[in-house]
């Protein structure tokens, strides 16, 4: 099985860089989902990868100045969306209720959500990792039965820091997520995200517990990204 690769471009690039990026991905990768900033979504649509968004708003339309709805995203061909990224949870104060509303709205608009979960450093140090992740998952899926789910395990302390958990630590959490989702009877794919780069992706991609990767900084250089994808194949 090919690994799923999600490139989260975050709030980077001017228009020229966005277009260069799109043109640089000059081979077809049917397992690559590129998530640009909203303003470049249409400019970056390509036959060589799938287009995704980094977020979306949970109400379809109306007086919500500055927001972009999943309904609008669907209208321009967005197929996937990251939901509940830790930067949105921690820097933009999204709680589990907002994350759930976004998750549901995303699915209602035929966009596949990629749900991010993960613990802070303090939570890990206090042995709360598994508890926090269970809480994040149950707050969405306990009373909401759906079929195929994609989850990205992203420890907050590993995002943009060049520090990662060990493979054993990642596998422990992924196994735990699998168990929780099995209890809920939901088939799930689990990606890992947080400081994935060209040096560590090979080791991680050998693991059967890791179905793919959510990549931030290391995805900003399209050539580096393509090299990384090939390493996972
Ligand atoms: P990073 O970001 O690869 O730069 O750590 C990952 C993410 O935020 O999804």
Image (cartoon, helix red, strand yellow):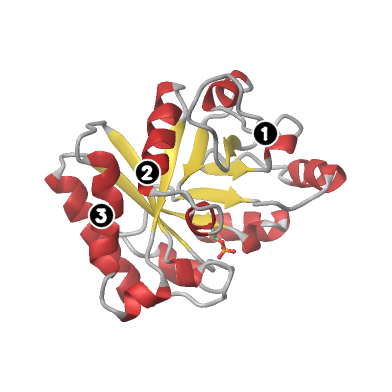
Q: Which numbered tag is attached to residue 150?
A: 2
User: Residue 25: image x %, image y %?
Assistant: 71, 45
Q: Which residue is mark 3?
A: 135
User: What secondary structure is found at the residue carrying circle 2?
Assistant: strand
Residue sitting at x 36%, y 47%: 96
Q: Which residue is mark 1?
A: 66
User: Residue 55: image x %, image y %?
Assistant: 55, 40
User: Residue 153: image x %, image y %?
Assistant: 38, 58
Q: For residue 233, say whether it is visible.
A: no
Callout 2 environment at 10 Å: few (<14), some (14 to 19), or many (20+)? some
Q: For residue 148, say whether it is visible.
A: yes
Q: Nearer the viewer, residue 58 or 80?
A: 58
Residue sitting at x 38%, y 76%: 122
User: What secondary structure is found at the residue carrying circle 1?
Assistant: loop
**What's the distance in space between the residues labelled 2 and 3, CA to CA?**
17 Å
Residue ranking furthest to the right = 16
């Amino acid at each position: 099985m090919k690994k799923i690769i999600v490139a989260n471009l975050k709030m980077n690039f001017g228009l020229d860089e966005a277009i260069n990026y799109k043109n640089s991905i000059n081979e077809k990768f049917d397992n690559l989902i590129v998530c640009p900033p909203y303003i470049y979504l249409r400019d970056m649509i390509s036959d060589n990868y799938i287009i995704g968004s980094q977020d979306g708003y949970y109400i379809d339309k109306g007086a919500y100045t500055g927001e972009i709805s999943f309904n609008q995203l669907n209208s321009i061909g967005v197929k996937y969306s990251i939901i509940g990224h830790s930067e949105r949870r921690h820097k933009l104060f999204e709680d589990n209720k907002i994350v759930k509303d976004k998750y549901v709205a995303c699915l209602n608009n035929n966009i596949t959500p990629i749900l991010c979960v993960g613990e802070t450093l303090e939570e890990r140090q206090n042995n709360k990792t598994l508890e926090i992740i269970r809480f994040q998952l149950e707050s969405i899926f306990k009373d909401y039965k759906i079929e195929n789910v994609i989850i990205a395990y992203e420890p907050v302390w590993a995002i943009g820091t060049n520090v990662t958990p060990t493979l054993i630590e990642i596998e422990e959490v992924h196994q735990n997520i699998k168990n929780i989702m099995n209890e809920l009877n939901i088939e799930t794919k689990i990606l890992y995200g947080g400081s994935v780069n060209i040096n560590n992706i090979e080791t991680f991609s050998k693991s059967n517990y890791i179905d793919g990767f959510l990549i931030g900084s290391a995805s900003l250089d399209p050539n580096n990204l393509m090299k990384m994808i090939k390493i996972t194949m």
